[in-house]
Image: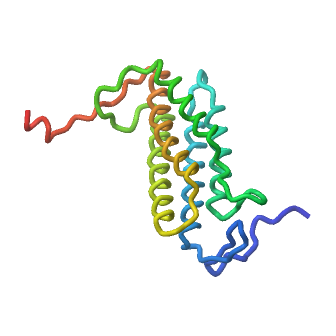
Amino acid sequence: MAFKIYTKTGDKGFTSLANGARVSKSDSYVELYGTCDELNSSLGVALGFYPSNVSGEPVWKIQNLLFELGSELAGFRKKDTNVSIILEEDIQFLEKEIDTMQEVLPELKSFILPGGSKAASFLHVSRTLCRRLERMMVTSKESGGEIFESSLIFVNRLSDYLFVLARYLNFQEGQEDIKWFSRAKAKND
């Protein structure tokens, strides 16, 4: 018999965390790993619109890391340890990717609006989801939740990566950054 996707154990608004605890589906940890899943899903949509001349491999790696981060936020811990699944090398990976893309991008001289190609537009949505996840992680940590420093740094760096990646994909597709023009500043000039 095939594995059933429905268990009926959540029908009354409760679910199990990875550590076995039963909690309300409104629990902050459920919100955390749910937002991580939203972010991961949005990256999948962005990949569906990737130009053929750009490899999706770095984003697939990030999606795998986000899946593991989601399980960490749900209470899973590596056996016999109390450290994050996110390693310093994962943060360095993002930084290296950012630096590589920045080498070919035109210098950013003004704020830009989210948009451009379909892939870049979805990456801007991913970036904002990433920032929401980061805010939620900070709130949880400030409330005494177990949020590992490396996980928080990774999510912060990931939002930077997604911003640069959106610019990079626009660049690869011949789309210029959409500059923001301030009406308030124009009135004062």
Between 65 and 121, the one lying in front of the other is 65
> Which image quadrant is residue 70 in?
bottom right
Q: Is residue 10 left or right of residue 173?
A: right
Q: Colour scheme of this structure image?
A: rainbow
- Which percent across, then down, holds residue 119? 51, 35
At 59% across and 48% down in the image, what residue appears? 40
Considering only vertical position in the picture, is 103 above or below 79?
above
Outermost residue, left side = 188
Outermost residue, bottom side = 12
> Which image quadrant is residue 145 in?
bottom right
Considering only vertical position in the picture, is 81 above or below 43?
below
Between 57 and 161, the one lying in front of the other is 161
Q: The C terminus lies in which quarter of the figure?
A: top left
- Which percent across, then down, holds residue 26? 54, 73
At 58% across and 63% down in the image, what residue appears? 146
Outermost residue, right side = 1
Q: Is residue 5 left or right of residue 65?
A: right
Between 49 and 68, the one lying in front of the other is 68
Q: The N terminus lies in which quarter of the figure?
A: bottom right
> Which image quadrant is residue 82 in?
bottom right
- Which percent across, then down, holds residue 16? 69, 72
At 71% across and 68% down in the image, what residue appears? 19
- The tally of labels here is 0
